[in-house]
Amino acid sequence: MATKKSELHLDDYVKGIARLRPDEQLSLIEVISSRLKKTLKGRKAKHSIMELERLGVHIWKGVDILQYLSGERKSWD
């Protein structure tokens, strides 16, 4: 009779970790960390901070920056 392969869930792994010795837990962390680094290394960032360049530039059009800064500094007092 064929047996169905059972599926492991996160809780199953967590319970298994508790049964490991501390040195085995550290080794497991190293394995997971190494695999995760490899997985993330190949991914390209979805966005770049440079996409924000010149965003809102129209708000500052015609504003005298030195005068604006002077007014802000006076408001601190």
Image (cartoon, grey):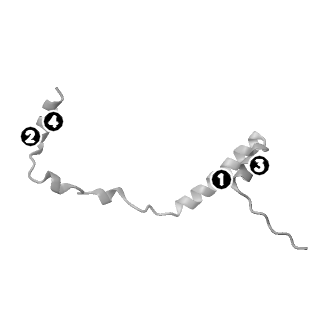
Residue matched to label 3: 16
Distance of label 3 from label 1 (alpha carbons): 15 Å
Distance of label 1 from label 2 (alpha carbons): 55 Å
Q: Residue at x 39, y 61 (%)?
A: 47
Q: Residue at x 78, y 63 (%)?
A: 6
Judge left or right: residue 75 versus residue 7. left
**Res. 32 mark:** 1
Q: Which of label 1 and label 2 is nearer to you?
A: 2
Badge 3 vs badge 2, beta-carbon distance below 8 Å: no
Q: Secondary structure at mark 4?
A: helix
Q: Secondary structure at mark 3?
A: helix
Give the amino acid type for the residue marked by disc 2 in the picture.
Gln
Question: Based on the displayed image, in which of its 4 quarters is residue 75 positioned?
Answer: top left
Q: Residue at x 75, y 43 (%)?
A: 18
Residue matched to label 4: 72
Distance of label 4 from label 1 (alpha carbons): 51 Å
Residue 43's x, y, as percent? Answer: 50, 63
Q: Residue furthest top?
A: 77
Residue 17's x, y, as percent? Answer: 74, 46
